[in-house]
């Protein structure tokens, strides 16, 4: 599977990364190089093998459904690029 | 010199009052002042805070309340959130970020009295094997080629700053994270020890996420025993990380003296790669001989899916990264680039804030998770990952640990392997399988190549059996008697 120009553009949009037109050929070539190399996984017989989602050698623990932490809005907002009172501020979204 | 001491020796000297924690910290801060402008191992140096911690350590020592790391100066990878100290992950997008909280691993080190000299340089978001992707410039490896002493070599990556700092005696030990080899490969390139513990042994809470199912925090030091001392402090169950293992932390330091008598050590034939330098093959055979002489039984074994480790990793890790890095949107923290509307703000922020390698991986990850391609790439990679884990599980039914080289080469020069991303990825061929399987693995410096550069051997163990990994690593260390020193180091 080889990525064409339009697919690279679509992935960049999905990933919310602005990519200039002039950069697309380079990205296309790099991404296709990586995907071409990854394609060797198609040699492996994975019939009947359950996918492994993680490396944790144990079952995940259950915990009480309670709020264990929080209640410090100033700390949460301390790194905000822009704020308005106790809120994060962004450019106008709704006209 | 104080900067040449091991952590175990310094701990002893502090308790006997031979020198103070302030003396020890100042010696390291002076070394950083002298060498960091060249090595670029630290992004941030905590001069005043470190001295404050040192005075507190001296007061604790005077009261007889020393803990396992009281007064020991460390380097912290800039991926660990440190309260009130800027944490960048080597990225422009986090350049302004000052965490309002402390990661669990660094909180454990502080609890045990450690002193934080500063935050170390790294590949951006831990994505790299050379430290060349850092937004804060590359790190210089303190080792030099005999034949080509002017060449500036890479320290490996992604934890290259911590590895270079420990090798050059700017710190007694340090923290790193290993997602595909980012502790063990730089340890090998810099002639020091680094261990990636079992997945779940060290909490990931407060560690800037790259690939959550693969990220393993762990220590660097100049001896196996020092790594054991550090890991014992860093490890432990943390309810704030749902994958943190609720298992007891053994006395790792004690296991270093255990020896290998009667252990069965597997030598996996698939790690003998084409084009591997003869010196690495020879060092591996030497390692086998050392362990046999020390009383271990050597067994040829097979891990048939080894060659699929890297391509599996380059689907799973970017997929998880594309999801984890979605949080960098210019709204709640980090860099913001102005945009015409919210979407434009997101896209411009991420274009300006992420470097080329991070963008490539986010794009690959987005693609392999996208509708229509998920089964062909991501699901298939997860199935191959299951086969890689099965290889380890089967082989560990008959051996106690595995011995392999750590990396397929010694440190290379800055600028090499930069033209083709896949060439850089191949550096992690021997380290990636242990990340995918979550099993513990250590790199121990074992010899030099013809150019005088250090080479590491890797010991891989069973899940939660770091004790055996330390025992085998320490046996290799004793047999190798590695005492070569990097050209650039404190006091030289």
Image (cartoon, coloured by chain):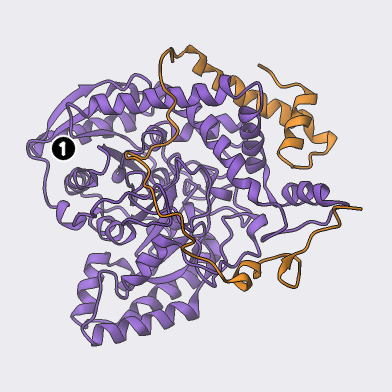
Chain colours: A orange, B purple
Residue occupying the point 67% across, 29% down: A30
Residue occupying the point 59% across, 33% down: B421
Q: Quadrant of the C terminus of chain B?
A: bottom left
Q: Secondary structure at mark 1?
A: helix
Residue B402 relative to residue B204: left or right: left
The percent coordinates of residue B485 (x first, y second) are 33, 56
In the rendered view, tell whether residue B432 sits above or below residue B89. above
Quick one: which residue is furthest to the front in this view?
A65
Q: Is residue B408 visible?
A: no
Q: Quadrant of the N terminus of chain B?
A: bottom left
In the rendered view, tell whether residue B65 sits above or below residue B249. below
Task: Write down the quadrant of residue B267 in the picture.
Answer: top left
- Given residues B93 and A11, the one toward you in this image is A11
| Tag 1 residue | B290
Residue B417 relative to residue B349: left or right: left
In the rendered view, tell whether residue A35 sits above or below residue B467. above
In the rendered view, tell whether residue A13 sits above or below residue B210. above
The percent coordinates of residue B369 (x first, y second) are 61, 30
Q: Chain of mark 1?
A: B
Residue A19 relative to residue B410: left or right: right
Task: Write down the quadrant of residue A4 in the picture.
Answer: top right
The percent coordinates of residue B329 (x first, y second) are 71, 52
Q: How busy is the neighbourhood of tag 1: few (under 14 within 10 Å), some, or many (20 plus)?
A: some
Residue occupying the point 50% across, 72% down: B33
Q: Is residue B314 visible?
A: yes
Residue occupying the point 49% across, 81% down: B48
- Given residues B113 and B25, the one toward you in this image is B113
């Amino acid at each position: 599977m080889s990525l064409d120009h339009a697919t690279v553009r679509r992935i960049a949009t999905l990933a919310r990364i602005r990519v200039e037109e002039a950069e697309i050929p380079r990205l296309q070539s790099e991404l296709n190089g990586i995907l071409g190399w990854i394609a060797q996984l198609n040699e492996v017989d994975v019939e009947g093998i359950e996918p492994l989602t993680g490396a944790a050698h144990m079952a995940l623990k259950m915990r009480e459904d309670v709020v264990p932490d929080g209640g410090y809005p100033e700390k949460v907002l301390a790194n905000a690029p822009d704020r308005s009172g106790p809120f994060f501020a962004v450019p106008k979204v709704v006209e | 010199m104080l900067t040449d001491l091991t952590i175990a020796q310094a701990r002893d000297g502090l308790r006997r009052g031979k020198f103070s924690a302030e003396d020890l910290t100042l010696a390291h801060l002076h070394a950083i002042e002298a060498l960091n402008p060249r090595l670029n191992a630290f992004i941030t140096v905590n001069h005043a805070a470190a001295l404050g911690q040192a005075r507190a350590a001296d007061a604790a020592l005077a009261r007889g309340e020393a803990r396992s790391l009281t007064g020991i100066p460390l380097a912290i990878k800039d991926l660990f959130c440190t309260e009130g100290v800027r944490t960048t992950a080597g990225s422009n997008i986090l350049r302004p970020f000052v965490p309002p909280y402390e990661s669990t691993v660094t909180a454990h080190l502080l609890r045990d009295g450690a002193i934080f000299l500063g935050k170390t340089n790294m590949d951006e978001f831990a994505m790299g094997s050379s430290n060349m992707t850092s937004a804060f410039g590359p790190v210089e490896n303190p080792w030099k080629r005999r034949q080509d002493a002017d060449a500036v070599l890479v320290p490996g990556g992604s934890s290259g700053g911590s590895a270079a700092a420990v090798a050059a005696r700017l710190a007694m030990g340090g923290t790193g994270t290993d997602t595909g080899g980012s502790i063990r490969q730089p340890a090998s390139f810099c002639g020091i020890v680094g261990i990636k513990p079992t997945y779940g042994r060290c909490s990931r809470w407060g560690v800037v996420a790259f690939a959550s199912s693969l990220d393993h925090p762990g220590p660097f030091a100049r001896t196996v025993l020092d790594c054991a001392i550090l890991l014992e402090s860093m490890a432990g169950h943390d309810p704030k990380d749902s994958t943190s293992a609720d298992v007891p932390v053994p006395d790792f330091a004690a296991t270093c003296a255990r020896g290998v008598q009667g252990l069965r050590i597997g030598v996996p034939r698939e790690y003998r790669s084409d084009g591997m330098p003869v010196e690495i093959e020879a060092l591996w055979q030497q390692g086998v001989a050392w362990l046999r002489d020390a009383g271990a039984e050597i067994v040829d074994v097979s891990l048939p899916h080894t060659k699929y480790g890297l391509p599996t990793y380059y689907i799973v890790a970017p997929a998880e990264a594309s999801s984890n890095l979605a949080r960098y949107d210019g709204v709640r923290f980090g860099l913001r680039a102005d945009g015409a509307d919210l979407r434009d703000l997101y896209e411009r922020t991420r274009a300006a804030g992420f470097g080329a390698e991070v963008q490539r991986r986010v794009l690959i990850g987005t693609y392999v998770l996208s509708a229509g391609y998920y089964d062909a790439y991501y699901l298939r990679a997860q199935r191959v990952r299951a086969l890689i884990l099965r290889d380890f599980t089967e082989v560990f039914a008959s051996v106690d640990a595995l011995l392999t080289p750590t990396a397929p080469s010694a440190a290379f020069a800055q600028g090499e392997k930069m033209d083709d991303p896949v060439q850089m990825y191949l550096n992690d061929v021997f380290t990636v399988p242990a990340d995918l399987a979550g099993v513990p693995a250590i790199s121990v410096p074992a010899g030099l190549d013809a150019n005088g550069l250090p080479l590491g051997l890797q010991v891989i163990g069973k899940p939660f059996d770091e004790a055996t990994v330390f025992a085998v690593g320490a046996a290799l260390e004793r047999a190798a008697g590695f005492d070569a020193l990097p050209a650039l180091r404190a006091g030289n």
